[in-house]
């Protein structure tokens, strides 16, 4: 990205377009890579999925990816898997975005709640998200932490 846009040394914000539709942030404590400043996503219902190319979480709102980050906290969560997308993965043996964590964006803080349980998804083992320790399906939770490549459900949720 060297040479593209202008960098403000005080805020470490690089404007990528003549109009600041998209802004890149570097050195942010929450691991925020870029966002669209016209859209405040806190309190909005979003879909979050693991971006395998950028090695981060992609946050999608109304069908458009608005944010890439390393950590995000969601409330009132449902775990969604498109069965048609899963079948395509099984048929082609190639990954695609077909499973998301949908919920209300609560925070982008770099924390995981005390006693949280890890949740995993593997399209080759089944069509649902599962607790990593017990291998039992999980369909929803009150609070979910997506932290550095792993999904954590708050204990008791």
Image (tube, grey):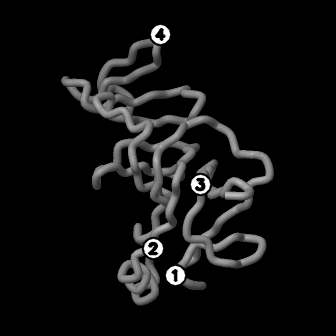
Question: Taking the image as drawn, is residue 60 in sight?
Answer: yes
Question: Taking the image as drawn, is residue 52 in sight?
Answer: no
Spatial CA span between label 4 and label 3:
38 Å
Residue 47 drawn at (x, y percent):
42, 55
Q: What secondary structure is found at the residue carrying circle 1?
A: loop
Q: Contact, CB < 8 Å: mark 4 with mark 3? A: no
Spatial CA span between label 2 and label 1:
7 Å
Q: What secondary structure is found at the residue carrying circle 2?
A: strand
Give the labeled residue for mark 4. 10
Give the labeled residue for mark 2. 81
- How many marks overall? 4
126 sits left or right of 86 in the view: right
Q: Earlier in the sequence, mark 2 or mark 4?
A: 4
Residue 127 bears which disc, if any? 1
Spatial CA span between label 2 and label 4:
42 Å
Label 3 Cα crowd, 10 Å radius (few <14 / some 14-19 / many 20+): some
Q: Earlier in the sequence, mark 4 or mark 3?
A: 4
């Amino acid at each position: 990205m060297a040479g593209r846009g202008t960098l403000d040394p005080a805020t470490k914000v690089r404007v990528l377009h003549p109009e600041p539709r998209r802004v890149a942030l570097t050195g942010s404590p929450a691991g925020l890579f870029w966002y669209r400043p016209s859209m405040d996503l806190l309190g909005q219902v979003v879909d979050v999925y693991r971006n395998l190319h950028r090695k981060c979480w992609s946050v999608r709102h109304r069908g458009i990816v608005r944010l890439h980050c390393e950590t995000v906290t969601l409330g009132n969560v449902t775990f969604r898997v498109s069965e048609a997308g899963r079948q395509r993965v099984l048929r082609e043996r190639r990954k695609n975005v077909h499973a998301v964590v949908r919920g209300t964006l609560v925070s982008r803080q770099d924390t995981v709640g005390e006693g949280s349980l890890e949740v995993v998804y593997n399209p080759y083992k089944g069509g649902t998200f599962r607790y990593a320790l017990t291998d039992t399906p999980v369909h929803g939770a009150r609070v979910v932490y997506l932290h550095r490549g792993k999904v954590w459900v708050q204990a008791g949720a």
